[in-house]
Amino acid sequence: MKSRVIVITSGKGGVGKTTTTANLGTSLAMMDKRVVLVDTDIGLRNLDVVMGLENRIVFDIVDVVNGKCKLKQGLIKDKRFEGLHLLPAAQTKDKTAITPHQMKNLTNELRQDFDFILVDCPAGIEQGFRNAIAGADDAIVVAMPEVSSVRDADRIIGLLEAAGLRNSQLVVNRLRSKMVRRGDMMDIKDILDILSIDLLGVVPEDECIVVSTNRGEPAVMESASRAGAAYRRIARRMMGEEIPVISFDEPENLFYRFKKILKMAR
Amino acid sequence: MDIINRLLGRENAGSRDIARERLRLVLIHDRASVSPNFLNALKEELIRVIREYMEIDEESIIVDLENEDNSVALVANIPIRGFKRAANE
């Protein structure tokens, strides 16, 4: 299998880049892929805590690119899943501690040992963004169904295209089906019409994400989590499986169906 | 009004449509202004075409996007110095 470097980006902060990176990476590793998660948010690292690996950090990405340690020493092996690794960001430096050129060399070196190199991009469009996309083959753009997030996603898609990444795919995160049904949230079609890029998947709003982040266990490990299930489906799509995207516009649990039937009877 | 709508069983006009419309307008501005050459290139092209028909004050031309009520308009202010006789034919 040819290795792929995929940057997960969004422009706006807080829309779920890190959560998406952690869950897709874990999910791919659960399917026996060799995966490395690269946190490029230097100064504001978080992928380590979302993954529950914060206590095992010795070296970081800046140490690796500056030759303070070997690449192998910088990688943290996730003991829960064979083949899953994390390269953490540095916490005490800033985004200029790495150059796009160094980042490209780093991802190329990682290609030797991994099937998927998932790069968690910082918010913003400055050097951190330019570093994160430098070595990428493809991009996943994460957006929430709200005006500010979609606007920033549009800007990011433009910047990705200008950098030669023309096949960005969209993950719509934190969709609230109830709000869509009552006409208070843009639906998937609205967002796709505006951004005109391919849809990779839709992740519903899910309290499980907070719980799993509290615990440091990605939601894909939790079989009851709706968001976790959505991320597992996205990972399968990344592997080339053709499975339909669930839009979450229609109620799909028993309670909602029951309510719907009651409404119709009235 | 809200209450009347609800009593009649009408759906509330949701904020989704407002969001979609505002995004559409803001992205026209964003996309045009993100590439700094866009408006300049358009201006050059306009000058080239209009010059065929009339004498214009090329220095004072203003080409910009402006917000109307529910749309964005491309507004060009092009001072004319004079008409070429041939164009009147």
Image: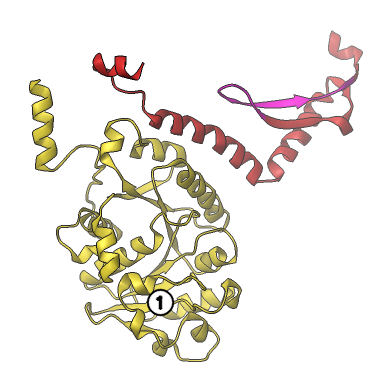
- Determine the image quadrant of residue A217: bottom left
Chain A rendered in what hue?
Answer: yellow
Q: Which residue is mark 1?
A: A111
Work out which residue is located at the far front of the displayed protein and give it.
Answer: B3
- Near mark 1 (Cα within 10 A), the count class, few <14, some 14-19 or many ≥20, is some
Q: Amino acid at mark 1?
A: Arg
Residue B84 point in image, percent of width and height: 90, 16
Residue A102 point in image, percent of width and height: 56, 78
Q: Is residue B41 magenta?
A: no
Direction from residue A96 to residue A180 in the image, left or right: left
What segment carries the magenta color? B66-80
At 53% from the left and 67% from the top, the residue drawn is A134
Q: On screen, A134 above or below A189?
A: below
Kindly state the secondary structure of the residue where label 1 is placed.
helix
Quarter of the image where the N terminus of chain A is located: bottom left
Q: Nearer the viewer, residue B8 or B80?
A: B8
Q: On screen, A100 above or below B45?
A: below
At 39% from the left and 35% from the top, the residue drawn is A190
Work out which residue is located at the far top of the displayed protein and give it.
Answer: B89
Q: Nearer the viewer, residue A229 or A213?
A: A213
Q: Is residue B75 magenta?
A: yes
Identify the image's colour scheme: rainbow, by chain, secondary structure or one colour.
by chain
At 36% from the left and 77% from the top, the residue drawn is A86
Chain B rendered in what hue?
Answer: red
